[in-house]
Image (spheres, rainbow, N blue to C red):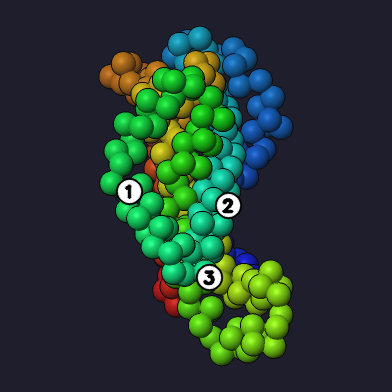
């Protein structure tokens, strides 16, 4: 666990990590800096300037304030989605990797089946069935986002399971729960936690893509994908409605991807 924390901490001190921290801070401080992102505080469709760096909307609302609040929603949902996927994947992968045998064969079959499914179409159908909401997003990630975490956990647990000190602990009669909790788990989940911490941006981009087509969150929710979709028809005469939220999403994705590579290979600068 200390190894995972150290790897993520080392990555956060890189340029990509600092960019990620700045974006998260902007999202976290949004309610303090802009208590009411829907407040009318300028001319309608004002171009970017000193008073409104990202311009204003059709109603005269500040686009920077709305972008910050939308990032807050996306990052929070992204973190929750990763935690849900991690919990399901770590449980399934851990059981398969430790017990092996028919449990492992069953896991491989379910994993292959899940990978073969048209996930995007199923998520859209799920949203239409249950309605666009945060809970629908989390259910979708729980059903289909667990696969990479489960496979990585399975590999790590299987590796640790065959180490000599684990076999010795089992031979002296330690309960299986004690072996897993004290020895297998803490030595298996470092890479899984690193993967999860560095891939929040991927979850955010997935949520934004679903929101862009209107199947992620209810209408009226401030969210990056919805902001891009709403501003797209006015791209020629009010480009800032789409460009600045899009740049925020791209910046988050690039920072997350570079952070992931930095954490995975601390010897290189990203």
Task: Find numbered disc 2 in the image and state the secondary structure of the residue it sits on.
Answer: helix
| Neighbourhood count class around disc 3 (C-alpha, 10 Å): few under 14, some 14–19, many 20 upward | many
Q: Quadrant of the C terminus?
A: bottom left
For residue 206, what is the image quadrant? top left
- Between the C-alphas of marks 1 and 2, the distance is 20 Å
Question: How dense is the environment of label 1, judged by Cα within 10 Å: few (below 14), some, or many (20 and up)?
Answer: few
> Which mark is first along the chain, 3 or 2?
2
Residue at 66% from the left image edge and 20% from the top image edge = 36
* Res. 174 image quadrant: bottom right
**How far is the residue under mark 3 from the one under mark 1?**
21 Å
Q: Please name the residue that numbered disc 2 is placed on.
A: 87
- Give the mark nearest the N terminus, 3 or 1: 3
Residue 144: give x, y in percent of width and height. Answer: 42, 43
Q: Residue at x 59, y 16 (%)?
A: 38
**In this rendering, the label closer to the viewer, 1 or 2:** 1
Q: Is 31 positioned to the left or the right of 216 in the image?
A: right
Q: Secondary structure at mark 1?
A: helix
SS at mark 3 in the image:
helix
Can residue 69 be seen here? The reply is yes
Gap in Å between the C-alphas at discs 2 and 3?
A: 16 Å
Circle 3 is placed at which residue position?
A: 98
| Residue of label 1 | 113
Looking at the picture, tell me which residue is in the foreground, 219 or 138.
138
């Amino acid at each position: 666990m200390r190894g995972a924390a150290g790897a993520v901490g080392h990555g956060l001190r890189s340029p990509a990590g600092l960019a990620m921290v700045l974006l998260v801070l902007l999202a976290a401080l949004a309610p303090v800096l802009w208590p009411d992102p829907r407040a009318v505080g300028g001319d309608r469709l004002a171009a970017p300037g000193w008073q409104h760096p990202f311009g204003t909307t059709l109603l005269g609302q500040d686009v920077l304030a709305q972008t910050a609040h939308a990032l807050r929603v996306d990052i929070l949902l992204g973190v929750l989605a990763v935690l849900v996927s991690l919990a399901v994947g770590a449980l399934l992968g851990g059981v398969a990797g430790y017990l092996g045998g028919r449990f492992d064969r069953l896991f491989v079959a379910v994993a292959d089946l899940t990978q073969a499914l048209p996930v995007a179409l199923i998520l859209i159908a799920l949203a239409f069935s249950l309605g666009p909401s945060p809970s629908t997003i989390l259910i979708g990630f729980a059903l289909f986002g667990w696969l990479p975490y489960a496979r990585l956990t399975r590999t790590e647990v299987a590796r640790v399971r065959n180490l000599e000190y684990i076999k010795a602990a089992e031979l002296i009669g330690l309960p299986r729960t004690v072996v897993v909790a004290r020895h297998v788990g803490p030595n298996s989940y470092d890479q899984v936690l690193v993967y999860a911490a560095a891939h929040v941006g991927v979850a955010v981009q997935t949520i934004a893509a679903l929101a862009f087509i209107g199947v992620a969150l209810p209408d009226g929710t401030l969210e990056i994908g919805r902001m891009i979709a709403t501003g797209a028809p006015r791209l020629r005469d009010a480009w800032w409605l789409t460009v600045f939220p899009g740049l925020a999403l791209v910046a988050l994705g690039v920072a997350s991807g570079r952070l992931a590579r930095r954490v995975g290979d601390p010897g290189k600068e990203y």
